[in-house]
Structures are given as C-alpha cells and as structure tokens.
Amino acid sequence: MAAAGWRDGSGQEKYRLVVVGGGGVSYFVTDYDPTVEDSYTKQCVTDDRAARLDILDTAGQEEFGAMREQYMRTGEGFLLVFSVTNRGSSEEIYTFQRQILRVKDLDEFLMTLIGNKADLDHQRQETLRLLQRLIPLKWISIYTDTFFF
C-alpha cells in the first residue's frame, strides 16, 4: 500500500485497495451478483491513526478491461484473489499481476495474493505451486482464517 494514501477534508487517511480475480472465486459476500464493480468501505486504525479503506471489487468483469485498467492506475494496493479449488483462477492471477505492473509502468509493486476456499481440502488443486512458477513471489505466508468485517 502507498505510504501516505490521501486525506479527505477531515484529515483522515484514505487508502484505495483494488480486488482482482476471476469471476466466482467467492469473496466478500455470500450471494454473488456480478456487476461492473462493487465497493466497500472499512474504517480502521493504522499507525495509531484513524483511516478509511476504500475497497473496489472488479473481479469477474473481463469485458470491462478498460475500466479495470483505470482502477489499476489509481489503486494503492491490490488483493489478487484466486480459488485453491480452481487451477484456472490461479492462471488468471498471473495475467492480472502482469497487467497491474504494465499499467503502473513498474517492475515491482506490492500486491497481496489471497487463496480462497482453503476450507475445501477435498477439492484443492495445485494452485500455489503453479503461482510460484508463474510469479516471482518474494514472501509467502501460508495461513488461513476466515473473518468478516
């Protein structure tokens, strides 16, 4: 995430996170209704200061590539979501990672890779190993938990 974010009139720090991933990798809501985009806001504390996360979900909207590139230009952090039960969704993550770097005209940018559906052990595929071959991952933490905010 960017070091400073931006401030609104109240002086509160704001950070723009963009969620990308293939359609149907199931995150945020239990009833998935595909739209062009969806957004969420979360108030939190970071570095002992109140902050607001503006989270933009663009996943599953392949037909709106130009709009997604605009989100990528303005995003300060990225959540790349794939399903551990769908090898194809991990291949899509590689495409999104390359697109973010191209749009930002950078060789590196901080992104968080999220493997969803980790509780479905009986359906798990070799998605993480595939991603390790496709994307030069610098840090990998294998920890799963479910939370709602």
Image: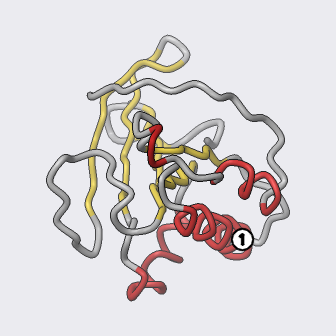
Name the residue at the front extreme: 122
Whether residue 71 is situated above or below residue 13 in the rendered picture: below
Judged left or right of residue 118, residue 54 is left
Q: Residue at x 41, y 40 (%)?
A: 120
The C terminus sits in image quarter: top left
- Residue 84, how many percent across, how many down? 52, 49
Q: Amino acid at mark 1?
A: Arg
Whether residue 38 is situated above or below residue 139 in the rendered picture: below
- Residue 19, how many percent across, how many down? 45, 55
Specify the quadrant of the image occupied by residue 28.
Answer: top left
Sort mark 1 into few (<14), some (14-19) or many (20+) by Cα contacts within 10 Å. some
Q: Which residue is under mark 1? A: 98
**149 or 7: nearer the viewer:** 149
The N terminus sits in image quarter: top right
Whether residue 94 is situated above or below residue 144 in the rendered picture: below
**141 or 96: nearer the viewer:** 141
**91 or 105: nearer the viewer:** 91
Q: Residue at x 47, y 84 (%)?
A: 65
Specify the quadrant of the image occupied by residue 8.
Answer: top left
- Residue 109, how many percent across, how many down? 74, 53
Count of number-bearing discs: 1
Specify the quadrant of the image occupied by residue 52.
Answer: top left
Q: Residue at x 73, y 75 (%)?
A: 102
**73 or 118: nearer the viewer:** 118
Judged left or right of residue 29, residue 81 is right
Judged left or right of residue 80, residue 109 is right
SS state under label 1: helix
Q: Residue at x 37, y 71 (%)?
A: 60
